[in-house]
Protein backbone atom coordinates (compact mmCIF):
# COMPACT_ATOMS: atom_id res chain seq x y z
CA UNK A 1 0.00 0.00 0.00
CA UNK A 2 1.09 3.59 -0.41
CA UNK A 3 3.12 5.04 2.46
CA UNK A 4 3.87 8.56 1.20
CA UNK A 5 1.41 9.80 -1.37
CA UNK A 6 2.24 13.06 -3.14
CA UNK A 7 0.13 16.02 -2.06
CA UNK A 8 -0.43 19.26 -3.94
CA UNK A 9 -0.58 22.12 -1.49
CA UNK A 10 -2.32 25.32 -2.67
CA UNK A 11 -3.41 27.89 -0.11
CA UNK A 12 -6.93 29.11 -0.65
CA UNK A 13 -7.93 26.12 -2.77
CA UNK A 14 -10.33 23.34 -1.90
CA UNK A 15 -8.97 19.94 -0.96
CA UNK A 16 -10.89 16.66 -0.80
CA UNK A 17 -9.32 14.16 1.54
CA UNK A 18 -10.18 10.55 2.30
CA UNK A 19 -8.41 8.55 4.96
CA UNK A 20 -9.14 5.12 6.38
CA UNK A 21 -8.64 3.09 9.51
CA UNK A 22 -5.53 0.93 9.26
CA UNK A 23 -7.44 -2.35 9.50
CA UNK A 24 -9.73 -1.42 6.60
CA UNK A 25 -6.78 -1.87 4.20
CA UNK A 26 -6.99 -5.63 3.78
CA UNK A 27 -5.73 -8.07 1.14
CA UNK A 28 -8.62 -7.39 -1.24
CA UNK A 29 -7.67 -3.73 -1.45
CA UNK A 30 -4.02 -4.57 -1.98
CA UNK A 31 -5.00 -6.83 -4.90
CA UNK A 32 -7.20 -4.13 -6.47
CA UNK A 33 -4.34 -1.63 -6.27
CA UNK A 34 -2.21 -3.97 -8.38
CA UNK A 35 -4.81 -4.59 -11.08
CA UNK A 36 -3.84 -3.37 -14.58
CA UNK A 37 -6.91 -1.10 -14.90
CA UNK A 38 -7.35 2.67 -14.97
CA UNK A 39 -7.10 4.51 -11.66
CA UNK A 40 -10.69 5.77 -11.68
CA UNK A 41 -11.91 2.15 -12.01
CA UNK A 42 -9.64 1.09 -9.15
CA UNK A 43 -10.93 3.93 -6.99
CA UNK A 44 -14.54 3.00 -7.75
CA UNK A 45 -13.93 -0.64 -6.76
CA UNK A 46 -12.12 0.44 -3.59
CA UNK A 47 -14.86 2.88 -2.54
CA UNK A 48 -17.59 0.34 -3.25
CA UNK A 49 -15.77 -2.29 -1.19
CA UNK A 50 -15.02 0.07 1.72
CA UNK A 51 -18.66 1.13 1.95
CA UNK A 52 -19.66 -2.48 2.61
CA UNK A 53 -16.56 -3.94 4.30
CA UNK A 54 -16.64 -4.82 7.99
CA UNK A 55 -12.83 -4.53 8.29
CA UNK A 56 -11.65 -1.66 10.48
CA UNK A 57 -15.14 -0.46 11.40
CA UNK A 58 -14.18 1.51 14.49
CA UNK A 59 -15.76 4.88 13.73
CA UNK A 60 -19.09 4.43 15.49
CA UNK A 61 -20.85 5.22 18.78
CA UNK A 62 -18.63 7.30 21.10
CA UNK A 63 -15.71 7.24 18.63
CA UNK A 64 -17.99 8.70 15.96
CA UNK A 65 -19.09 11.49 18.30
CA UNK A 66 -15.50 12.29 19.34
CA UNK A 67 -14.32 12.27 15.71
CA UNK A 68 -17.14 14.57 14.63
CA UNK A 69 -16.43 17.00 17.48
CA UNK A 70 -12.69 17.01 16.77
CA UNK A 71 -13.12 17.69 13.04
CA UNK A 72 -15.54 20.55 13.72
CA UNK A 73 -13.11 22.11 16.21
CA UNK A 74 -10.41 22.22 13.51
CA UNK A 75 -12.47 24.67 11.43
CA UNK A 76 -10.48 27.91 11.24
CA UNK A 77 -7.53 26.27 13.04
CA UNK A 78 -6.24 23.83 10.41
CA UNK A 79 -8.47 24.72 7.46
CA UNK A 80 -11.78 26.22 6.45
CA UNK A 81 -14.15 23.28 6.85
CA UNK A 82 -16.74 22.86 4.11
CA UNK A 83 -18.21 19.43 4.91
CA UNK A 84 -17.27 15.94 6.03
CA UNK A 85 -18.67 12.45 6.19
CA UNK A 86 -17.63 9.81 8.69
CA UNK A 87 -18.14 6.26 7.51
CA UNK A 88 -17.53 3.25 9.80
CA UNK A 89 -14.02 2.67 8.43
CA UNK A 90 -13.05 5.89 6.64
CA UNK A 91 -13.58 9.65 6.60
CA UNK A 92 -14.18 12.06 3.72
CA UNK A 93 -13.52 15.75 4.28
CA UNK A 94 -13.74 18.81 2.02
CA UNK A 95 -11.95 21.95 3.16
CA UNK A 96 -10.20 25.07 1.95
CA UNK A 97 -6.49 24.98 2.65
CA UNK A 98 -5.17 27.66 5.03
CA UNK A 99 -1.82 26.09 6.04
CA UNK A 100 0.56 23.62 4.40
CA UNK A 101 -1.47 20.55 3.49
CA UNK A 102 1.00 18.08 5.00
CA UNK A 103 0.86 19.91 8.33
CA UNK A 104 -2.96 20.06 8.35
CA UNK A 105 -3.24 16.35 7.52
CA UNK A 106 -0.66 15.39 10.15
CA UNK A 107 -2.50 17.35 12.84
CA UNK A 108 -5.93 16.13 11.75
CA UNK A 109 -5.00 12.45 11.61
CA UNK A 110 -2.90 12.73 14.77
CA UNK A 111 -5.82 14.20 16.69
CA UNK A 112 -8.10 11.44 15.47
CA UNK A 113 -5.78 8.61 16.52
CA UNK A 114 -7.54 6.81 19.37
Image (cartoon, grey):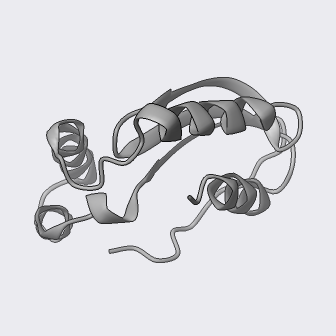
**Vertical comparison of 92 with 81: above or below:** below
x then y, percent, for residue 42: 20, 52
Q: Is residue 102 left or right of residue 1?
A: right
**Vertical comparison of 60 with 22: above or below:** above
Query: Which residue is at 32% across, 74% downward?
Result: 1
x then y, percent, for residue 32: 14, 62
Query: Which residue is at 47% across, 40% downward?
Result: 91
Can you name the residue that lies furthest to the top here? Answer: 82
66 or 18, nearer to the observer: 66
**Vertical comparison of 21 with 85: above or below:** below
Whether residue 85 is visible here, answered yes or no, is yes
Q: Is residue 44 left or right of residue 76?
A: left
Question: Quadrant where the C terminus lies?
Answer: bottom right
Can you name the residue that lies furthest to the front here? Answer: 62
Whether residue 14 is visible here, answered yes or no, is no
Q: How many marks?
A: 0
Query: Which residue is at 56% across, 31% downward?
Result: 65
21 or 39, nearer to the observer: 21
Query: Which residue is at 40% across, 36% downward?
Result: 60
x then y, percent, for residue 72: 72, 29
x then y, percent, for residue 2: 39, 73
Asked which quadrant contains residue 97, the reply is: top right
Q: Is residue 89 left or right of residue 17?
A: left
Asked which quadrant contains residue 29, the reply is: bottom left
Amino acid sequence: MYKNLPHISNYGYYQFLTFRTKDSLDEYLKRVMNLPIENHNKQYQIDKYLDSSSHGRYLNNSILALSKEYIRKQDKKLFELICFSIMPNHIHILFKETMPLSEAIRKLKGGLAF
